[in-house]
Structure formats: C-alpha cells, structure tokens
Amino acid sequence: MLYVSFACRLTLAAVMTLAAVAKLRSPGVFAASLKGFDFIPARLRRPLAVLVPAAELLIALLLALPATVTAGFLAAALFCCGLTAVPILVVARGKKVTCACFGAGEVPMSGWHIARNAVLLAAASLGSFMAISLGDGVPGQAPGIALAVVSAGLLTTLTAFVDDIAALFQSPVAAGDLGR
C-alpha cells in the first residue's frame, strides 16, 4: 500500500506544480477568470490570484520533503475540498465560467472538472489516510516504484488535459462545428 501512497504523492505534487506554474506564467488570465465566480467577493479575487498558486506550490513542497509528507497530504485534501466545491457551485448555478486552472482555458466548467477535482481529493484523502496509518516513507522495491511513477504520470496527464479529453466526447455540433 505504500506504493499507492507514493503514486498519490507524486501525482498531487506534479498536478499542484503544473497548476501553479500555469497560473504564475499568466497571472492576469487567472485573475480575470476569477471574475466569473460571482460567489467569490470581488475584494478577495486579487488576493486569491496570488494565494492559490502559492498554496499549490506549498503543497507540492510539503509532499516533496520526507519530513512533511503527512502535512502535505492533509493540506492537499483540504485544498482539494475547495477545488471540488468551486465547479460544483458553478455547475449547480448553471453558470458558464471558464477554468483557468492550468492556464488560459476556454472550456466552461462542467462535470469533467468536478470529476477531476474529486479524483484529486480522493488521492489526497487516500494519501492522508495511508501516511497517518502506515507512515510516509518511500517504498523500497524498484518495480513497485516504477509502477507508482508511471501511474502518477498517467494520472497527472489525464488531470492536466481534462478539457481536451472532455472535448473528445462532445458531438461536433456541441464543440462548435456544424458537422459539415
């Protein structure tokens, strides 16, 4: 089970780093996207544009350092609760808000974003449980480590490209093409 925890750790650290770097590369895009969230008070949007990527980088750092893995998992679980609540609120309200989670996204939030964030929340929760109950060490067998790394790479890729994956399942008319 330590391999599962390690895969969760790698996935969360990679996803948080990718998301933070994307936001920091285009801070104006992320800040502008927060205007679409009418449930976030206007006075909090500018600080959030700085605090969200800072929190993501902090979580990645906590997960990277052996002495703080458990704290990193717990912080990731709390952070992912918020990340999951946001698209739930957007979808429940019927709003068309774009997600700038991994940069300049043009796809409105949907059930795909809820599912993505729920998977990250599950990974953070599972990692937290395992770190608390089994410890937060790195497993020792090379084949298991390799499988954890490959699994984390796949899950990170699926997470970062959820908008592109969702587009594959849309009909051409829904994606903007008239089907001709």
Image: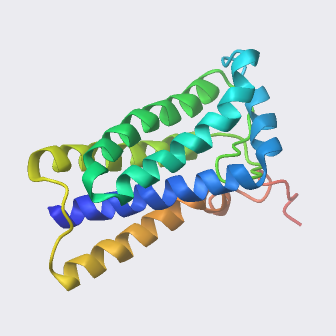
| Residue nearest the observer in this picture, 26 or 106 | 26
The location of residue 161, given as percent across then percent down, is: 60, 61
Question: Looking at the figure, which quarter contains the C terminus?
Answer: bottom right
Check the image and name the residue furthest to the bottom: 143
Q: Which color scheme is applied?
A: rainbow
The location of residue 165, given as percent across then percent down, is: 60, 62
Instruction: Report which quarter residue 21 is drawn in.
Output: bottom right
| Residue 162 seen in render | no
Instruction: Report which quarter residue 87 is drawn in.
Output: top right
**Is 141 left, or right, of 12 in this rendering?**
left
**Is 14 left, or right, of 110 in this rendering?**
left
The location of residue 112, given as percent across then percent down, is: 56, 47
| Residue nearest the observer in this picture, 135 or 103 | 135
Q: What number of labels is visible?
A: 0
Question: Looking at the figure, which quarter contains the N terminus?
Answer: bottom left
Name the residue: 57% across, 30% down.
86
